């Protein structure tokens, strides 16, 4: 009897050693995914603030990066006092340098300025860089001082219209620092990314993973609210979609849904069908017409009337008389 109890106790210990670490590992990974979602939400907000600063400050990369770091203050502690906010902002600045965050301006591109540069506007803004107009876009296809620009996205350098070129598009890649990760789970996720992205040729992403960070990517698009000034914008030539427009709408919905009676929107009643070759059944009780006795009301003799016909039938088209 004692021997059986000893064997059962040993089996329980083995089950505990196998199951509990596995469950704990899964639990830690679930918590890590929750923190990853929180970090992605914070990154989306910071990207929005960065894009908004860029739209109002001529797409200036320095203004975009400063706004991004300021918006990340909450992720690095936040605070309720000026001193606490200043300390958190300092942490955000230290951890959002170009080594940890890459902010790419996908549009406007170098080719956008090739197509829509306005020398007169650049002179008015007192800048030697190229500038794109941002006002009266509903009425302009080219800058007012260069009306002969190539505005056709099928053949110009950028593959954009002037409206498209005034969209600020950002792609931001940031790495979650190791001290913001769950022990063991964060290292496992970082290891998995290094294995899955072994063939990745992007040195920046590989550098984030090598530093123990978890790369997170976000995109944002916003309409420019000020004239964009060229500042080392990336080159991305080529007409959009090779000049072949595509319908961005939904795909074919398939066969049409059955039509139901207005009194039966749920289609609970079977539809009324008539066998081929048969006629619709005739209602034995036809509805009375306008000239039937049931609808006829005698009207006094015309001698007593001065404002209308002698009877109701005279008011109907064609009358009711045989």
Image (tube, helix red, strand yellow):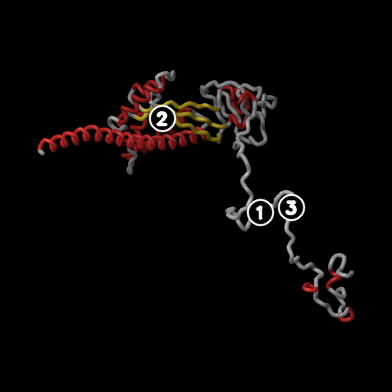
Q: Which residue position holds label 1?
A: 272
**Distance Cα–Cα, label 1 vs label 3:** 13 Å
Residue farthest along the bottom direction in this orientation: 304
What is the crowding at mark 3: few (fewer than 14 residues within 10 Å), some, or many (at least 20)?
Answer: few
Are the residues at dot 2 and dot 3 in contact (C-beta closer than 8 Å)? Answer: no
Give the residue drawn at x 49%, y 36%. Answer: 52
Q: Nearer the viewer, residue 15 or 154?
A: 15
Give the residue drawn at x 36%, y 32%. Answer: 92
- On the rendered image, what quadrant is the C terminus found in? bottom right
Q: Does any portion of residue 158 appear in the rendered image? A: yes
| Closer to viewer: mark 2 or mark 3 | 3
Q: Secondary structure at mark 3?
A: loop
Q: Secondary structure at mark 2?
A: strand
Mark found first going from the N terminus, 2 or 3: 2
Q: Does any portion of residue 70 appear in the rendered image? A: no
Q: Which mark is residue 278?
A: 3
Q: Which residue position holds label 2?
A: 216
| Closer to viewer: mark 2 or mark 1 | 1
Q: Nearer the viewer, residue 170 or 321?
A: 321
177 in relation to 293, above or below:
above
**Distance Cα–Cα, label 2 vs label 1:** 58 Å
Q: Secondary structure at mark 1?
A: loop
């Amino acid at each position: 009897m004692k021997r059986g109890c000893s064997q059962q106790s040993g089996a329980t210990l083995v089950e505990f050693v196998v199951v509990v670490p596995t469950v704990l590992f899964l639990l830690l990974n679930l918590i890590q995914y929750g923190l990853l979602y929180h970090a992605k939400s914070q990154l989306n907000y910071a990207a929005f603030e960065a894009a908004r600063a860029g739209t109002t400050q001529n797409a200036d990369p320095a203004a975009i990066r400063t706004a991004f770091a300021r918006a990340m203050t909450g992720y690095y502690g936040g605070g309720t006092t000026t001193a606490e906010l200043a300390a958190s902002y300092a942490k955000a600045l230290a951890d959002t340098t170009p080594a940890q965050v890459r902010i790419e301006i996908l549009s406007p591109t170098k080719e956008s300025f090739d197509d829509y540069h306005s020398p007169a506007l650049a002179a008015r803004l007192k800048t030697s860089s190229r500038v794109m107009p941002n006002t009266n876009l509903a009425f302009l296809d080219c800058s007012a001082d260069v009306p002969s620009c190539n505005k056709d996205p099928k053949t110009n350098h950028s593959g954009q219209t002037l409206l498209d070129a005034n969209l600020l598009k950002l792609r931001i890649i940031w790495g979650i620092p190791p001290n913001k990760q769950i022990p063991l789970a964060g290292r496992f996720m970082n290891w998995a990314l290094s294995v899955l992205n072994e063939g990745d040729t992007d040195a920046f992403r590989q550098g984030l993973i090598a530093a123990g960070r978890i790369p997170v990517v976000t995109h944002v698009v916003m309409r420019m609210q000020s004239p964009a000034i060229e500042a080392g914008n990336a080159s991305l030539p080529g007409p959009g979609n090779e000049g072949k427009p595509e319908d961005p709408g939904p795909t074919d919905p398939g066969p049409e849904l059955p039509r139901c009676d207005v009194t039966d929107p749920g289609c609970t009643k079977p539809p009324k069908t008539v066998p081929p070759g048969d006629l619709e059944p005739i209602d034995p009780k036809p509805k009375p017409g306008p000239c039937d006795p049931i609808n006829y009301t005698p009207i006094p003799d015309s001698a007593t009337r001065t404002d209308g016909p002698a009877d109701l039938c005279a008011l109907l088209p064609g009358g009711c008389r045989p």
